[in-house]
Amino acid sequence: MFLNQPYSLSSHRPEYSNIMQLPKTQKAAIKQGTGDNATITIKEIPVPEPAPDQILVKINYSGLCASDKSLLHDEWDFKMAECTEGIAGHEGAGIVVAVGANVQDLWQIGNRAGIKWIASVCRRCEFCTNGQDECHCPKQLNSGFTVAGTFQEYCLTDARYATRLPDGVKDEEAGPIMCGGVTAYVACKRSKVLPGQWIVIPGAGGGEYAHSAFVSSSVFRSDEIETVI
């Protein structure tokens, strides 16, 4: 999914010293209805402004995950929060177009950024501070679930948890890495598998391509096992 709209440099909106002149409205894919009858409608909504610890990313590409489909069709017991305004998506890649006052040492306009399923963590609980398990942070915010996701032209996200994208990675490559790629990387990392050892990946699903890429680049042996229940 590509979302494109031009923007230009400006010194407008003086409350943020690191911000572009942006349009007042944007297009977003918004959930309509519930359950199997839910649909997506393209609507015009306001372009948000970043809070002091946020960045605003102009989304150039957003992948579509099976989790998005489940949330949009209410297939799980938990539902999208009202504050998402029906905007799903968590595989976003784009360009930073506004930077909050507290994080201008971390991001500059024009930097490339990725937005993941986990949009923010508290950085204070035991899970966040042990260096391994921030994915279990009880105060985490999730793109397209508890905060508005990437199915819009301009998306806010936590500046301290956004992913900086290198120039050598295209937007359409970076987007899916924000979900299946992160899952595969963390799995390989936590397994502590060493080069030359076997790693078995049961039910690889959407992360299969990423597992294969990480395994190949790290010279691991891989045997992907798909099971049918």
Image: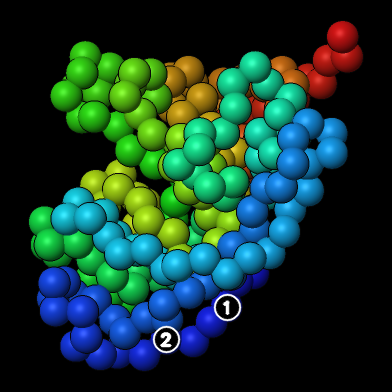
State left or right for residue 220 relative to residue 112. Answer: right
Where in the figure is residue 86, as x and y percent of width and height? 59, 46
Total numbered labels placed on residues in the image: 2
Q: Which mark is residue 176?
A: none
The quarter of the picture where the C terminus appears is top right
**Between residues 154 and 90, which one lies in front from this camera angle?**
154
In the rendered image, the vertical position of residue 103 relative to residue 200, given as above or below: below
What residue appears at the point 50 percent right and 38 percent down from the top-left corner?
A: 82
| Residue 87 visible from this viewpoint | yes
Where in the figure is residue 87, as x and y percent of width and height? 57, 49
| Residue 177 visible from this viewpoint | no
The quarter of the picture where the N terminus appears is bottom right
Q: Residue furthest right?
A: 228
Label 2 element class = loop
Where in the figure is residue 116, as x and y percent of width and height? 47, 44
What residue appears at the point 42 percent right and 81 percent down from the top-left corner?
A: 23
In the rendered image, the vertical position of residue 7 relative to residue 160, given as above or below: below
**Between residues 67 and 179, which one lies in front from this camera angle?**
67
Dot 1 alpha-carbon crowd within 10 angstroms: few under 14, some 14 to 19, many 20 or more:
few
Quadrant in the picture for residue 126: top left
Q: Which residue is under mark 2?
A: 7
What residue type is disc 2 on?
Tyr
Q: Which residue is under mark 1?
A: 4
Quadrant in the picture for residue 15: bottom left
What residue type is disc 1 on?
Asn
What residue appears at the point 53 percent right and 54 percent down from the top-left corner?
A: 150
In the rendered image, the vertical position of residue 39 relative to residue 21, given as above or below: above
